[in-house]
């Protein structure tokens, strides 16, 4: 099943032992008050480092396609949640409430995720950030995670840019570690044979910082617009 109601174990989400703090991975949003998935200290190490845990007690999560159908295990789709923790509505905004919470009470997160056979969920990106190149769905988070393995890269943000033939092409803004230097061609060579050829960024830009909101969230829509204009892809 792609719906899991996992019995909540009676443990604190933050444990302190001998002066060390155990941090627990949690997933949710303001609209879900705010956690629907949680990772516990005794969960397998590979799950603790790659997923956001399993669904909490008295809460449901499911992953659906763009038609609202539950997808098979291991297939990406939108992560929906339902339960006592989901908000009733946005104050004074009925239209926005209807777009976020359907008639059956499911909150639509806008996050793309994958659930495994044990109910562990891995978030792979945002629907609005999905890149569709020549009919292939490309998840920016996957490419970002790969590029983070390069020892010279401090941070990376991947976006899609318009292309008249392919629909979109992959682009990356890369911030290098202090004192490091590398070329665009060297980055592309690092990718060859390690990720699919169509996921290798066609456009790469080295930056010192990203456009951010006041809460320090990266504004990818601004990156797309400014980079597309810089490359002459849009007016």
Image (spheres, rainbow, N blue to C red):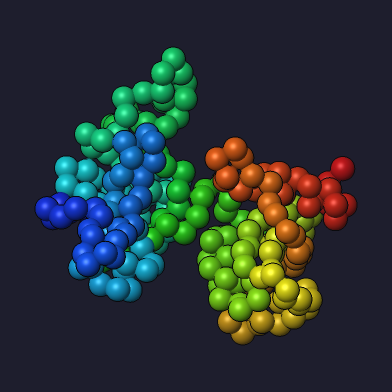
Instruction: Identify the residue shown where x is 74% and y is 80%.
Output: 186
**Left or right position of 114 against 129:** left
**Left or right position of 36 against 206:** left
x and y percentages locating residue 54 in the rendered image: 26, 57
Instruction: Identify the residue shown where x is 37% and y is 34%.
Output: 31
Which quadrant holds the N terminus?
A: bottom left
Q: In the rendered image, is residue 216 in sight? A: yes
Q: Does residue 84 sit above or below 217 in this rendering?
A: above
Front residue of this view, candidates 117 and 19: 19
Instruction: Identify the residue shown where x is 36% and y is 63%.
Output: 51
- Corner quadrant of residue 60: top left
- Corner quadrant of residue 2: bottom left
Which quadrant holds the C terminus?
A: top right
Front residue of this view, candidates 194 and 69: 194
x and y percentages locating residue 88 in the rendered image: 31, 25
Q: Does residue 71 sit above or below 100 in this rendering?
A: below
**Left or right position of 14 against 233:** left
x and y percentages locating residue 57 in the rendered image: 17, 47
- Of all residues, the one furthest to the front in this rendering is 19
């Amino acid at each position: 099943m792609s719906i899991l109601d996992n019995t909540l174990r009676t443990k604190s989400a933050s444990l302190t032992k001998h002066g060390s703090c155990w941090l627990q991975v949690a997933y949710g949003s303001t609209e879900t008050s705010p956690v629907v998935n949680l990772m516990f200290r005794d969960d397998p190490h590979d799950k603790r480092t790659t997923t956001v845990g399993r669904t909490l007690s008295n809460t449901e999560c499911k992953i659906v396609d763009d038609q609202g159908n539950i997808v098979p295990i291991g297939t990406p789709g939108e992560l929906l949640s339902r339960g006592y923790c989901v908000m009733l509505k946005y104050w004074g905004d009925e239209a926005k409430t209807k777009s976020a919470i359907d008639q059956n009470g499911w909150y639509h997160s806008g996050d793309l995720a994958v659930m495994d056979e044990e109910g562990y969920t891995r978030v792979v990106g945002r629907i609005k950030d999905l890149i569709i190149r020549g009919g292939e769905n490309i998840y920016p988070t996957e490419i970002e995670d790969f590029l983070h393995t390069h020892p010279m890269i401090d941070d990376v943000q991947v976006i899609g840019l318009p292309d008249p033939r392919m629909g979109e092409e992959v682009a990356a803004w890369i911030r290098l570690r202090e004192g490091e230097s590398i070329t665009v061609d060297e980055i592309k060579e690092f990718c060859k044979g390690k990720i699919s050829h169509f996921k290798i960024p066609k456009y790469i830009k080295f930056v010192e910082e990203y456009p951010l909101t006041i809460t320090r969230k990266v504004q990818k829509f601004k990156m797309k617009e400014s980079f597309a204009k810089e490359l002459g892809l849009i007016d």
